Each structure stands twice: as C-alpha cells, then as structure tokens.
Amino acid sequence: MKAVKAGICLMAIMLISGCWGQINFDQLTVVSAIGLDPDKNGMVRVTVQLSNPTLPVAAGGGSQQRRPFVNYDAVGITIQEAIERIQHQAKKSLFFPQTKIVLIGERLARRGLDDHLDYFWREMNQNLNSYVLVSRMPARLALDTAMELEAVPADEWRKYLEGDWKRPLQVDIQMYQFLPRLNQIGHQAVSPGIGPFNKSGKSEIMEIGDTAVFKNDRMVGWLSGEESQIVNWLTDASHSGSIHTDLAKEESVSFSLHSIRAQVTPVLRNGQLSMKVRVKGEAEVLTATVPLHYILENAMLRDVLNQQLESAVEETIDKVFRQYGSDVIGFGEALHRSMPAEWRKRKINWEKELRSLDTDISVSFRIRKSGLLH
Amino acid sequence: MHKQQISESQFFFIIFVSIASLTFFSVPSQLIPMVKQDLWLSMSLGTAIDAIVALLLYRLGLKYPGKSLVQYSRAILGPAGNLLSLVVLLFFFAVCVTAIWIYSDFLSSSLLPDTPLVAFSGTLTLCSGWAASKGIESIARLSQILGTIILISTFILFATSIPVVELRHLLPQFENGVGPAVIGAMYPGSWFGICILMGMLMPHLSRPRKTLKLKVSAVLLGALVMTGYLLYSIAVMGAHMASQMENPIFVFTRITRLLIFERIEVLTLLVFISGSFITYATLYYVMAQGFSELFRTKSYKPWVYALSPLFVVLPVLTVTQKFGQWPPYLDFWFPVVALSIEGGVASLLYVGSFFRKTKR
C-alpha cells in the first residue's frame, strides 16, 4: 500500500510541466472591441482592437512608448475564419472574455446578421456582456480613427453605455439581449448608433446617438434621440428623460422628466386587437426663454407638455410599427404574456398586425416646482 | 468492526450537495427546453416524488435498525432480495457512469476544450475513490464545508444578480397547460431519486429517527436553490435563449456579476465540481459497501479499487459517448428506468416487509 501511495506521489511530478493548453501571460492579448463589416461574396471583414497595456510608472513603464491599442483585420466566410487569420497577424493568443464592444457596420447590419452572429451563440469565450453598437461608417474605419479621452476607445464607449448618467436619449443593449431578439418575433432588437461627430486631424471624435432599428436580423432604419427615449420608456429601460417644448416662436421651455412609468397593454375588443399606452411621470422646468409664473401657468405648461409628448409617442409608435414594421417595443411579447392563445394565432402575421394596429395613447405628466416662484 | 457514524448535519449536507450538483450538470438541458418558466412545478413535483420514496425507506430503516438496504432486502425477500440489491447497485453504477460522462463532456466543451476526457474522469475517480476508501465520515465532514460554500455563494450571487433580472421573462405561466410541467417532473424526480442511497447511509446515522425530516428538508433546500438558479437563468436571458443553451445556469453566471467581479463562471464551476466530488464519493462508497455486503466480503475497500478503472474508462469510451448523445437516452430512458427502480424497489421492499416477521 505504501508503494502505491509513493507511486501516486511520484506521478505528481508529471504536473510540473504544466497543464494542457497553457498560455503564458506575455502570449496573451486582450480584445477590447470587435468590428464587423460586409465584404464581397457574402464574406465578412472582422477587425479586432487589441489592447496594448503599458506598465505603471512604478513598475518601470514610465519611459515606454507603446501604442495603447492595435487594430488587425481579416476577411473570412465566417467570423471564426477571419479571427484565425488575425491570429496569424497578431502572433498572439486572442483573449475574448473581456471584449467591451461589438461594432457592427451599418452596411452589414442592413445586409442581415443572423448567419454571422451564430459565432457569438456558440463560442464560449465570447463576452455576452459586450455592448453592441451600429456604426454609421465602416466599423474598421471607426475603430482606426476614433479618438477618445481614454487611450482605448472601446473602454470609453463601454463606460459611457454602462453609466447611469448617460443621456436617456440613448438605448443600450448587451450581446445576450441582442442575440435572441434577432429571431424573436414579439420583441425585436435595437442598438445605439455611433458615428463621426468632429474631425481632429486624422482622428474622428465619435458621437454615440440615435438608434438602429432591426426587423429580425436586418437593420431597417434609424430613430432620433427623442424617439429613442420614448422606446426606452415603453420598454421599461429608462424612467427619465428630457424635452424642449415650443410655446411660441422662439419661446421654449426645457423640462427634465423623472419617475416615468409606461404601461403597454394589449386590448382585445370584438376580435380587434389594439394597444393601450399609458405614460405617467413628473416634469421639472430646467430653463425657460420666457417669464413664467408657476402658479398661474402651471396648467398651461402641463397641457402643452402632455400634448407634445402624446404626439411624440404616437409618431414614434407609428414610425416603428408602420414605417419599419418592427416590434422594438415588445408589444408582441406583452400580448404573449397576457393572452398566450391570442398570440399563438397572431404571431404568424405579426408584421401585418403591427402595421394595422389601433393605438390608444394617454400621457399625463405632473409639473413639479423647481424651487423658483417665477 | 467499528461502524463509521455521521451526524445529522453531515447527512443533511451530503444530500443537499448531491441534489445541487446533480441538478446543475444534468437537469437544465432537459427541463428548460421542455417546460421553460413552468419548471418550478416540475421541480416541486420531483421533490414530492422523492419525499414519498424517502418515507418508504425511512419506515424500512426503522423496521430494520442498523441494517442497510442491501441487508434488509435479503431479510425481506431472501435470494430475490439479493437480486434486487444487485439491480440497485448496478443502477448506482450506471448513474455514476452517466453523471461522470455528463460532467466530463460539459467541462470539455465549456472550459477546457484541449484536455482529453479521460483527464476529467480520471481525476474525479481518483479523488472520489480516495475519499471513498477513507470511509463515509471523511466525505461527510467535507460535505459540511462544501455545502456551506454552495449556500453562501448562491445567496450572494442571487442578491447581486437582481439588477439583471427581468421578471416578465417568467410569464406567461402554463402557456401549454400543466401537462408539460407534470411530465417534466420525471427529470428532477429521477435525479433527486438517486438519494435512495439514504437506504445505505441510514445505518451510519447516529440518530436514525431524524432521517426522514433531514432527508426531506435537504432535498427541499437543494431543489429550492436549484429552482432559483434555473428561474434566474430564464429571468436574465429569457426563455427563448435559455432553452437553446446546453447549460443555461452556466451561461447565467457568464452574464451576471458577483459583487464587483465579472465572468464568475469558473468560480461557479469550481463550487459545483467540488459538489460533484462529494456526490460521486458518496455513491462510490455506497456502491463499494453495497457490493461488499452483497457478496459478504470482509472489507469494502477492494471494491473501491476494483470499480475505479471502470469509472475512468467507461464514461469516455466512444460507445458510451454515442449512447449518451443519443437523445432518447437522457430524454426518456434514463428518467423512466431511474424512476422505476427508485420507486419500484422502495415500494416492493415496503410491501414485502409486511409479510415478513421482523428479525432483530
């Protein structure tokens, strides 16, 4: 028995050589962003932004002159094939679990994504928490020319999308939310857009704004910031916002909106499906270009605000349902949750149902005192 | 010979850890695609099935104090009882091979793709075999530590995952009626039922009268924790995505955060792999003890050594893998056969015990 135990202990020496597939730290490079663009014959161009961390000054990195990131790109029939080619260029093992951003070029998004994004479903090392953005310019160009305060642009974009302080006019979506909506009829995908805002030498200062609307796996159009915030309310993704109301020519009041609660309810009457939307919240006057008296003009301001918001909600719903034929609000899922049998009947022709849907919208905001009497 | 004894809390944690780790590796891929958000009913029914079996084994254990399932089977049914014990022990053997295959296959596809399967089955068998050869006391002591780690890490994980939970993903309930959830109960029921190993552990308990209460509460807690994991997976990623993933709980831990830490799937796997170690070590010990009692050998240890090559090699053979990946095996045959043996053996012995005078 002692000999067996000694033998087992001796066998442990075999472990000294290390484990299967060990990768030393200096052979590993972290992928910060992945860019996807279309190429010829249905191929896809993949760009990866690799972080090149500099050592802290205390660790002797003070005099280092290293580029903070390097971009590599390659073309392949699948994303996997392109990434294998990039691996040969980078000569390092690519580490994907910390990928911050997946940037999809608008042209590829309009061509259709489902064939390519299968990679993100299957590849276990991919980060399902990475944020998805649609780039107005080719993703490769955006990653090459973007200039941000942070050394690696993808880090800046992720922090911005993650932060609660970001403007409510923006949607945000992570890969695990984006993927299933590409083939989910009752709740389809949206993604924030990114595009050049200002040129500074060879670099571009990028702006994250507007929203790309998808119908199944294809992008079908854009929503403005104001429309995006309404989508955010209706999908329960945000409970705040801002709006500028025009009282008369060159006379406007800016409101900050809080505690917004939106309710989207399917109503079935005589076999006719309609959508009941109720939006409630509080508004606070942020600034006004006209003299205001809170007590005297409260009712007038409230009516103008509610009227303007009501038509904004109506126009947004009209745009996504009738113009784009896409259910980014998740009304289909709301119907599925409350009337499963009805959903089963209607989901086959859901796009047609959306286009002919009646809506009953009511908006009621209460104006809160802003601390001033006038 | 001095009989190894385990305390009440040790027995509780052996059962709890076994339920948690068996459910983590085996149940999600069958249950979620079939019943989605109604799985809580399947898990509850599975627990109820197990409680009934536990009640029968408890009564038998009290009727034949100090005797294990193998020993009282012989006392009740004579030579036929030996055959019944053999069936139970072979069933434990099949469960071990199946569970080690699921474990190795999952680790290979999710975490260590370059590592040969035999490394997983080999290390697990080596560790659990070693623990089994030391006896149930050492396994039981370790189960207390690991069970506590599972409970604490689960509690923190559930609390810190609240921001990513969308409760509306858990609706509609019973979209296709209660039928699928009732049928789906066979999956958790069959895996929970493996706790008929209670019949082998009961003689080791210092106070056997408390066995039923402990067993039922351990299964309840295990089922509750794992139902929590399964429902969290659906609430975070939606039933549509969760039903397409091989192990949605694993994907859930890829998405969520533990306090400030991201990508905690390795940590979760570590916890459940340790849990699997307890489960296999207990099953291994129970099997060796059972064979030793059945064939009346002096010690159970030679059986531990004899079984080890089979547990290393059988789960990774191409034939086993093909059989495991053959859908009707895990979807139909395993739960049906498991439930028949778990429920059938306990009922047969219980009924048989009425016709046999108790020998003390």
Image: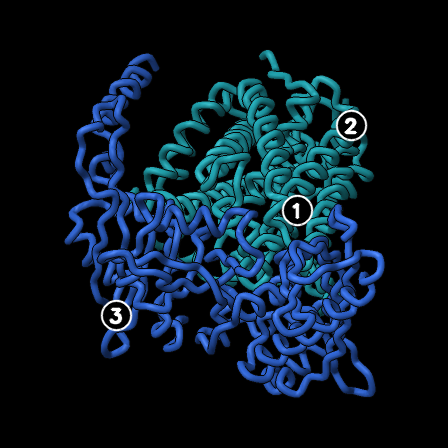
Identify the element where label 2 is drawn.
helix
Q: Do labels 1 and 2 share a chain?
A: yes
The residue at 52%/72% (across/down) is A223
Question: In the structure shown, which secondary structural element does the residue marked by tag 1 occupy?
Answer: helix
**In the rendered image of this protein, does residue A39 appear above or below residue B263?**
below
> Which is more foreground, mark 2 or mark 3?
3
Q: The cyan chain is which one?
A: B
Viewer-nearest of labels 3 and 1? 3
Query: Which three-letter amino acid code belongs to the residue tagged 3?
Result: Ile
The residue at which mark 3 appears reads as: A77
Check if mark 3 and mark 1 are on a common chain.
Answer: no
Taking the image as shown, residue A347 lies to the left or right of residue A99, namely right
In-front residue for pair A45/A9: A45
Q: Residues within 10 Å of mark 3 (few under 14, many from 20)?
A: some
Please state which of the two labelled residues, at mark 1 or mark 2, is closer to the viewer. Answer: 1
Question: Quadrant location of residue A23?
Answer: top left
Amino acid type of the residue tagged 1 in the rendering: Thr
User: Numbered disc 3: what chain?
Assistant: A
Read off the residue under disc 1: B227
State the residue position of label 2.
B62
Dot 2 amino acid type: Leu
In this view, the residue in front, A247 or A268, is A247
Question: Viewer-proximal residue, B321 or A239?
Answer: A239
**Within-10-Å neighbours for mark 2: few <14, some 14–19, many 20+:** some
Report the Cα–Cα distance between label 3 and label 1: 41 Å
Tell me which chain the residue with mark 1 is part of: B
Residue at 47%, 22% (x, y): give it.
Answer: B133
Give the percent coordinates (x, y) of residue A93.
23, 45
Callout 2 and callout 3 share a chain = no
Farthest-out residue, front? A291
- In the rendered image, residue A323, in percent from the top left (x then y), is placed at 55, 84
Chain A: its colour in the image is blue
